[in-house]
Image: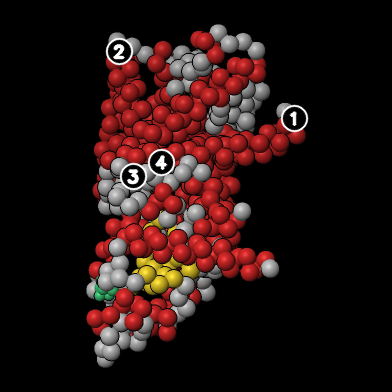
Amino acid sequence: MNFVVIIFGSALMVLVGGVFSMLYRGIDRKLVAHMQGRVGPPIVQPFRDVQKLMMKESIIPDGAVQWLFKAAPFICLITSALLLLYIPMFGQPALLGGFDGVPGFGDALLVVYLLILPSLALAAGGFASSSPYATVGAQREMVLLMSLEFPLAVSVVSLGWRIGQVTAANPFMFSTIAEHPIWSLVGPLGVIGSLILLFALLVATSGKGAKVPFDMAEAETEIAGGILVEYSGRNLCLFYVADIIKAFAVSALVVALFIPYNLSPLVGVGGPVPSGIVEGLFFLVKVFVVMFVSISLIRTAMARFKISQASWVYIIALTVIGLVGLILVAADLMV
Amino acid sequence: MSLTAFKRALWVYHLNTGSCNGCDIEILAVLTPRYDAERFGIKLVGSPRHADVLLVTGPVVRQMVARTKRIYEQTPDPKLVMAVGNCGIEGDVFHESYSLAGPIDQIIPVDVYVPGCPPRPEAIIHGVAMAWVKLEKSAKQGVA
Ligand code: SF4
């Protein structure tokens, strides 16, 4: 594979993905405001926030572990941006995911593991900032991370397992998933099972997006910004952008796993450029739907959980729901 | 350009230095759907480290002197301070009380005063607009 392509492609991908993530956060804030009967900030508000944060002084507290405090925002942003390269974006195959017989560097399972890293960086930054609020926030982040892993893994692995029944290729490869969409493999029972898995994944998306009701790590009204309490200026800005990119990437993951359909054959658009544009727009629509359901809607409709409740929701409730989905998908194979 | 970004994305930290809570309720009213300060990019944050504007209410009781100074120092530059309510401006109903060290501008530098007991939410939003004007003026002087 051509490494020049990879390097320039990555830079372009991160840039374009970042811009669209910020726009989507702006749309999310606007929609939430409308649902609450407010006018809401303009859609470009996240860009203004970022610009403003870059102008501010970055304070590093005396008691902090200096190098970790400074490194954590960078690690968080870099690992979040890495997600953009491993998940298929804008209707194109994932940049580092491998395509057309070229072996890739990673698949859906790798993405599930990569998703841990931004949270870990965030928690490390929280522990390093020597504030009791940040420590509480970091502990909550770790609890949430561990609770979330199980339902996330259950839904991704069940999907891969079912696809692995019909093909010899690596079923976790995004290209394989796109070739064999789950909905066309299964019967009625399996469709119900897959819907349940999709639901589990959507709720997990909401948790990964770290928004209400799963934002106890930041919880401004009770622990004053929690994990980020000591961060300011540029460092805060990096976390802010990383959070935005992560929410976009997780939504794109749901799209890649459960809605890997293409539009251009349907509307009869040929040629690489027109179909690329159609696919890109269709991808944006799909991500918008996922984000609207899993982030905006849940965020407006619910209040924050306590950390014990959130942990229960994920470890017990959602895992059971996910396993029921898996059993239904498996039972579908037997009948 | 950067000034536009700054003034359209003000994050506000709310500091109570011993007020009767009247002003604080009005500050929260600014964020409700009726006045919706978020449409100007104004957001209430939980930590002074994230803040651009300190909204200070109350007459600064003696216990709060050191803490008020500390919170002012914890806020990263550039920053603005708004004194909301008559209390912070001249003591109001607590005027000449034995327990006061204020008003606020004797403790930390204040940029904008919003009088009223309590001021109406419109007045607080007007105060933020005055803060923008002040920012613009200081930026022009910086250039000249
Ligand atoms: S100005 Fe009036 S309403 Fe505001 S804190 Fe003072 S006494 Fe209370």
Image position of A265 (left or right of A297) = right
Q: CA distance from mark 3 to mark 4?
A: 9 Å
**Quarter-wise, where is residue B144 in the image?**
bottom right
Q: CA distance from mark 2 to mark 4?
A: 38 Å
Front position in the image: A334 or A279: A279
Image position of B38 (left or right of A262) = left
In front: label 2 or label 4: 4
Circle 1: residue type: Asn
- Outermost residue on the top side: it is A268
Q: Position of residue B119 (x, y in %)?
A: 30, 67
Front position in the image: A225 or A164: A225
> Which residue is identified by label 3?
A38
Tell if the residue under mark 1 belongs to the same chain as the one under mark 4: yes
Tell if the residue under mark 3 belongs to the same chain as the one under mark 4: yes
Circle 3: residue type: Arg
| Subunit under mark 4 | A
Q: CA distance from mark 1 to mark 3?
A: 50 Å
Circle 2: residue type: Pro
Q: Which mark is residue A188?
A: 2
Q: Residue at x 55, y 14 (%)?
A: A264
Q: CA distance from mark 1 to mark 4?
A: 41 Å
Q: Which mark is residue A2?
A: 1
> Which residue is identified by label 4?
A30
Helix, strand, or loop for circle 1?
A: loop
Q: Is residue B72 above or below residue A300?
A: below
Q: Residue at x 27, y 47 (%)?
A: A303
